[in-house]
Amino acid sequence: MKHLTRSAILLVLFLYACSGAQSEVKKSWQNNVNTLNIEDLTEQNYTLLDAGTRLQASLEDSINKTGFKLTFDEAKFHLKYKIVEYDEGSPIGRIATLGASSSSQAKLRVKVALFDEDEMVGGWEVNSWLSGGLSEKKLFTKAAEEIAGHLKGNY
């Protein structure tokens, strides 16, 4: 009985794993209306450049929740940002003071502009801070979510 049960489970798993999809292209179509390209204008300072890279990764995740499609080719919209200020603070200080000390806070200030081809259609300055925790990832995630909110027109 055990062998029969195991065989049935393996058969179900095998059949479940065998799936796929195929399409035949008759005519190609591209949606260029909501395409967005992200450009980092942060200075070549190592600390700020690292922060710019981390913000871009968070932006790519957050923008997927908007109506925009990220592309590295020709895009209708261009999102340009520049990290103006980044202070990673003290992770140990944030833990030791339970986030009460402002001197140990991580801070991020970013200037962002949205361009429709060559015309600026929106501009924001986003401030993000982190009072507790060891990792600054939430600092970049919050800033990216704020920028994505502006892109959706929520603010």
Image (spheres, helix red, strand yellow):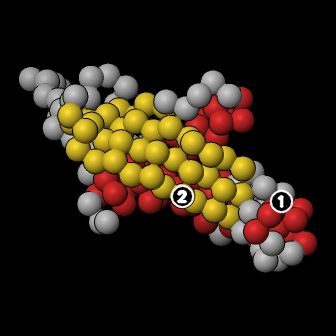
Q: Residues within 10 Å of mark 1 (few under 14, many from 20)?
A: some
Across and down, in percent, residue 120 comes to: 25, 38
Left or right: 7 in relation to 94? left
Left or right: 59 in relation to 103? left
- Vertical order, 15 against 96 (above or below): above
The answer to whether residue 53 is seen in the rendering is yes
Across and down, in percent, residue 15 comes to: 45, 49
Which mark is first along the chain, 2 or 1?
1
Residue 145 tag number: none
Nearer to us in this view, 81 or 149: 81
Across and down, in percent, residue 39 comes to: 43, 31
Q: Quadrant of the C terminus?
A: bottom left
- The amino acid type, in three-letter code, at marker 2 is Asn
Secondary structure under the numbered disc 2 in the rendered image: strand
Q: Quadrant of the N terminus?
A: bottom right
Left or right: 94 in relation to 49? right
Could you tell me if the residues under marks 1 and 2 are in contact, i.e. CB atoms within 8 Å? no
- The amino acid type, in three-letter code, at marker 1 is Pro
Residue at image point 39% right, 52% down: 124
| Numbered label tally | 2
Residue at image point 58% right, 59% down: 128
Left or right: 106 in relation to 5? right
Across and down, in percent, residue 117 comes to: 21, 30
Residue 127 tag number: 2
Which picture quadrant has residue 76? Answer: top left
Q: Whole-Å distance between the Cαs marked 1 and 2?
A: 19 Å
Residue 91 tag number: 1
Mark 1 vs mark 2, foreground winner is: 2
